[in-house]
Image (cartoon, helix red, strand yellow):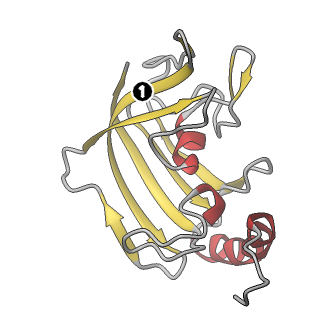
Amino acid sequence: MDDGDFFDPKKRFEEEKPIIKAYVTEKFPEAVYDSVTGIWYKVLESGTAGSYTYKVKDTANSKLIQANVNVKYSVRLTNGVEIDKSPADTGMNMLVGANLNTGAKSVINAWLYAFFPKKIGEYNLNGLTVNGLQKGAKIRLVTPSLWAYGHQSVGKVPEDAPLDFTIEVLDIKD
């Protein structure tokens, strides 16, 4: 970039659309496009219906949505190279959460869209599914870099990299 240039995430989002569409057409043709987020996805296994109910927890200073999950996952670049996966078949424990007041989150936005339901009461979360991911669910999603790591490189993820995730929910609880 020249000194006068600045990074425009909306422009990058638009630039990635044809790249992601070509990748999905070749490698993931059964994917469904979410027009709100630009994420392509397919629920591979729906899991146990009603095994978890997402809630907005109203604390003194914050409105929180969070779930403790045990997941198996893998992530690939759109060139097909696997760059990360959960370390064991027994899965990995993590918190999937967001503070609706501050915007703080424990995982990338793409994972929030995958896990959280479309809505909780008055809160429109833009989740990919009506009820959110449940125990036993498995989802594959291809996300624009805007909802992953954006214009920064993190570990093996280069800057501005759309990512292809497969996530399996082994357990989920408060």
In the displayed structure, 59 sits above or below 169; it is above
Query: Which residue corresponds to the image point at 65% horizontal and 40% vertical from the top-left?
Result: 128
Query: Along the horizontal axis of the image, is 142 left or right of 156?
Result: right
Query: Which residue corresponds to the image point at 38% horizontal and 74% vertical from the top-left?
Result: 156
| Rendering coords of residue 174 (x, y %) | 38, 18
In the image, 134 versus 156, the foreground residue is 156
Query: Which residue corresponds to the image point at 71% horizontal and 22% vertical from the top-left?
Result: 123
> Looking at the figure, which quarter contains the N terminus?
bottom right
For residue 22, what is the image quadrant?
A: bottom right
The single residue placed furthest to the bottom in the displayed view is 2
In the displayed structure, 93 sits above or below 152; it is above
Query: Along the horizontal axis of the image, is 110 left or right of 154?
Result: right
For residue 29, what is the image quadrant?
A: bottom right
Label 1 packing within 10 angstroms: few (<14), some (14-19), many (20+): many
Please give the residue where the numbered disc 1 appears in the rendered image. 67
Q: Which amino acid, by three-letter code, is at mark 1?
A: Ala
In the image, 139 versus 12, the foreground residue is 12
| Rendering coords of residue 129 (x, y %) | 63, 35
| Rendering coords of residue 61 (x, y %) | 56, 15
